[in-house]
Image: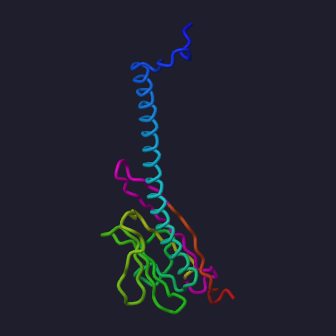
Amino acid sequence: MKNYLDNPQAGFTLIEIMVAVTVFMVIMTMSLNAMLAVSAQNKKAQHIRSITDNINFALDTIVRDMRLGSDYDCGIPDTEKNCVTVPFSMISFKDKEGATVMYARDGSTQSITRKVGTAAAYALTSDDVQIDRLNFYVTGVGVGDFIQPQAVIELSASIAEPRGNPLKFDVQTYVTQRQVESGLE
């Protein structure tokens, strides 16, 4: 067995250095690819989180306004204001100050819009999200029916992904008018 400590001129051969550098480069390339994949997944997760936060904000706004509002109306042409069996994609009601508030799905922009009084409607959802369906089921609006006004809100949305299929999801929430309806007191 040869002892390299006895020879001060001894060192690594060119072949040994090339093999070590090649092994190092292969390990670094694999590590870099893994880091890039994790970074891409993190960006995708942040994008999805931002969009779902936007939808949650829109639904929370609708629920808060409806809870404090009164005189729910789905826009049915006749005097019946309940829309239990047939859903409607819009709802209007009086807010706590007495102004008429309307929430609807805008078919051209595929967003949720909010309109207060005679002011122009504006979008509550960002352009990154596509609202495929917004339904309101309302009951308890009739006078003397002894049911507290309440609504079920259904929403179907999709998020466009640059690489791949759009992410689709459904959300449903329930809201009851906080103000006690006359006749229930």
In the rendered view, does 6 fall on the left or right side of 110? right
Q: Tell me residue 98's x, y (percent).
A: 51, 92
The furthest residue to the left: 108
**In percent of the image, x 46 and y 43: which residue is there?**
35
Q: What quarter of the picture does the C terminus occupy?
A: bottom right
Image quadrant in which you'd find residue 157: bottom left
Q: Which of 160 and 90 is in front in this view?
A: 160
Tally the marks: 0
Image quadrant in which you'd find residue 100: bottom left
Q: Which of 28 and 118 is in front in this view?
A: 28
**In percent of the image, x 55 and y 14: which residue is there?**
6
Q: Tell me residue 183's x, y (percent).
A: 65, 89
The furthest residue to the right: 185
Q: What quarter of the picture does the N terminus occupy?
A: top right
Check the image and report above or below for 11 versus 160.
above
Q: What stretch is highlighted in magenta?
A: 142-170
Q: Tell me residue 79's x, y (percent).
A: 46, 85
Q: Which colour scheme is used?
A: rainbow
Q: Tell me residue 118's x, y (percent).
A: 37, 90
**In percent of the image, x 53 and y 73: which residue is there?**
60
Tell me if residue 164 is in the magenta stretch: yes
**In percent of the image, x 58 and y 76: which residue is there?**
150
Tell me if residue 162 is in the magenta stretch: yes
Check the image and report above or below for 80 versus 33.
below
The furthest residue to the bottom: 98
